[in-house]
Image (spheres, rainbow, N blue to C red):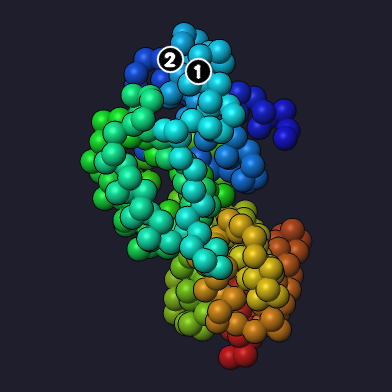
């Protein structure tokens, strides 16, 4: 972890302590992290703070802290939502959590649910958790851990406070995310008009073009990894899965090459108008059109 990220994380830890001490901690939070282990540690710290009965939370010496730190507190629950062999965070797992949330706590005056692998929640599962996020019992707190908030529905994001453990370079703006999603759709549909509309934004901003091409490269590479049979957490989980299911490994390799070549063209200060024309042409060619 770089000094920049460590400083940011330290501030977030202090923010959590202060918010809990003041009784102002939100009932729904989302922890965004590149490394799931870091995200889970932060989520457990939040849970520890919430159940702590001492001063300067977490005090580390009260019985609730001791149990929380030993992962044995009866009112702190962790789940990755998996059912059977599937890696998906299932809607049934969310429903189980939702039902259990209405049972009062055992020992603490609070009940905390740590939902890991949030990036693996499909739309149905997210809509299921949204129902209780909107009106949770007063004693219930939800901590969703995900490798990217971009995998979450806007309706869910509007109900949670986001704690991002990512560095500034790793974070993606809403504008960039929207462009990536729209371009993936346009490329898969080989829709020239849609491609032209999406790439028009690059006419006066070749640095944005470079950023988006880098993100598209990530999507295509992750899709290739997924197609090879390897399961891991991807920042663009939904897009990578869609691309992996739609394209052959050969097409994915061609798209990665196209993105790399276009980035090199930007580094050579190519004309923006020519860049956009070439981008549309090369993506169509890579798709065999």
Is residue 30 among the parts visible in the rendering?
no
Q: Are marks 2 and 1 in contact (CB under 8 Å)?
A: yes
Decide if residue 169 is on the left or right side of residue 193: right
Q: Which residue is mark 1?
A: 63
Q: Looking at the picture, does residue 248 appear above or below residue 198? A: below
Which residue is found at the position 38% from the left and 24% from the top?
A: 108
Task: Assess disc 2: are there few (<14), some (14-19) or many (≥20) residues with their C-alpha within 10 Å of its C-alpha.
Answer: some
The quarter holding residue 35 reads top right
Foreground mark, 2 or 1, reads 1
Which residue is found at the position 58% from the left and 27% from the top?
A: 69
Q: Position of residue 107 (x, y in %)?
A: 38, 25
Q: Looking at the picture, does residue 16 appear above or below residue 252? A: above
Decide if residue 244 is on the left or right side of residue 230: left
Q: Looking at the picture, does residue 188 appear above or below residue 35? A: below
Q: How much space separates mark 2 and mark 1, taking CA atoms?
A: 8 Å
Q: Quadrant of the N terminus?
A: top right
Determine the residue located farthest toward the top in the rendered image.
Answer: 55
Which residue is found at the position 48% from the left and 63% from the top?
A: 83
Determine the residue located farthest toward the left in the rendered image.
Answer: 135
Q: Nearer the viewer, residue 72 or 146?
A: 72
Q: Nearer the viewer, residue 193 or 102?
A: 102
Counting residues from the start of the chain, the first of labels 2 and 1 encountered is 2
Q: Nearer the viewer, residue 105 or 49?
A: 105
Which residue is found at the position 65% from the left and 76% from the top?
A: 227
Q: Position of residue 261 (x, y in %)?
A: 74, 70
SS assignment at label 1: helix
Q: Which residue is mark 2?
A: 53
Q: Quadrant of the C terminus?
A: bottom right
The quarter holding residue 93 reads bottom left
């Amino acid at each position: 972890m770089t000094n920049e990220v460590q400083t940011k994380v330290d501030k977030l830890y202090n923010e959590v302590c202060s918010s809990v001490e003041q009784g102002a901690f939100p009932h729904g939070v989302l922890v965004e992290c590149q490394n799931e282990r870091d995200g889970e540690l932060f989520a457990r710290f939040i849970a520890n703070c919430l159940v702590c009965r001492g001063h300067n939370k977490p005090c580390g010496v009260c019985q609730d802290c001791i149990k929380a730190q030993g992962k044995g507190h009866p009112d702190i629950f962790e789940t990755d939502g998996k059912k059977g062999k599937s890696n998906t965070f299932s809607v049934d797992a969310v429903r189980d959590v939702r039902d259990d949330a209405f049972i009062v706590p055992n020992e603490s005056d609070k009940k905390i649910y740590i939902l890991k692998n949030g990036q693996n929640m499909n739309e149905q599962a997210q809509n299921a958790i949204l129902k209780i996020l909107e009106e949770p019992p007063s004693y219930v707190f939800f901590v969703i851990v995900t490798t990217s908030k971009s995998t979450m529905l806007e309706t869910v994001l509007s109900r949670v406070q986001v704690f991002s453990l990512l560095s500034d370079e790793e974070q993606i703006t809403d504008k960039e995310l929207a462009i990536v999603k729209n371009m993936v759709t346009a490329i898969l549909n080989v829709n020239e008009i849609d491609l032209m509309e999406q790439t028009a934004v690059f006419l006066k901003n070749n640095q944005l073009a470079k950023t988006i091409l880098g993100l598209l490269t990530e999507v295509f590479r992750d899709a290739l990894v997924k197609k090879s049979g390897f399961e891991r957490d991807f920042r663009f989980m939904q897009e990578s899965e869609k691309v992996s299911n739609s394209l052959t490994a050969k097409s994915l390799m061609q798209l990665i090459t196209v993105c790399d070549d276009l980035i090199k063209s930007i580094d050579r200060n190519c004309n923006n108008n020519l860049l956009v024309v070439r981008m549309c042409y090369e993506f169509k060619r890579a798709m065999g059109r």
